[in-house]
Image: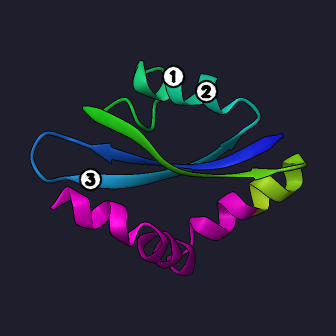
Amino acid sequence: MYYTYVLLCKKKGLETDLYIGFTNNLRERVLKHKSKNVDTTKKFDTINLVYYEACLNKKDARERELQLKTGFGRGYLKRRLKGYFAGLV
């Protein structure tokens, strides 16, 4: 299995970002992010897995990652996770 995943990354204060990636080992990849072993997310203080999708092959997972990184994809994620984000306020 391959996974497309979304992390909610927070810095001290109000700065947040959604990080979108794909992997074949979700647990290991999230641990790498949380232990500051990934350059793109090591600047964040808090990293939480908020969403993932499973795919049967690598190409589909990579294509989904690229879709979610677009403006439409980020809008989809905000609508899909509306309840989660409402609980953060």
Q: Residue 64 in the image: state x and y as whole percent.
A: 72, 63
Q: Look at label 1 and name its amino acid.
A: Leu
Q: Is residue 51 left or right of residue 25?
A: left
Disc on the earlier residue, 3 or 1: 3
Q: Would you say residue 19 sits in the magenta stretch?
A: no
User: Which residue position holds label 1?
Assistant: 31
Q: What segment is highlighted magenta in the picture? A: 64-89
Q: Look at label 3 and name its amino acid.
A: Thr
Residue farthest toward the left in the current orientation of the protein: 13
Rounded to the nearest angstrom, the CA distance separating label 1 from label 2 is 6 Å
Name the quadrant containing residue 22: top right
Which residue does the image show at 47% across and 28% down from the upper left? 33
User: Which residue position holds label 3?
Assistant: 16
Mark 3 or mark 1: which is in front? 1
Rounded to the nearest angstrom, the CA distance separating label 3 from label 1 is 19 Å
- Of the pair 75 and 40, the residue shown nearer to us: 75
Q: Quadrant of the C terminus?
A: bottom left
Rounded to the nearest angstrom, the CA distance separating label 2 from label 3 is 22 Å
Which residue does the image show at 67% across and 58% down from the upper left? 65
| Label 3 close to label 1 by CB (< 8 Å) | no
User: Which residue position holds label 2?
Assistant: 27
| Label 1 close to label 2 by CB (< 8 Å) | yes
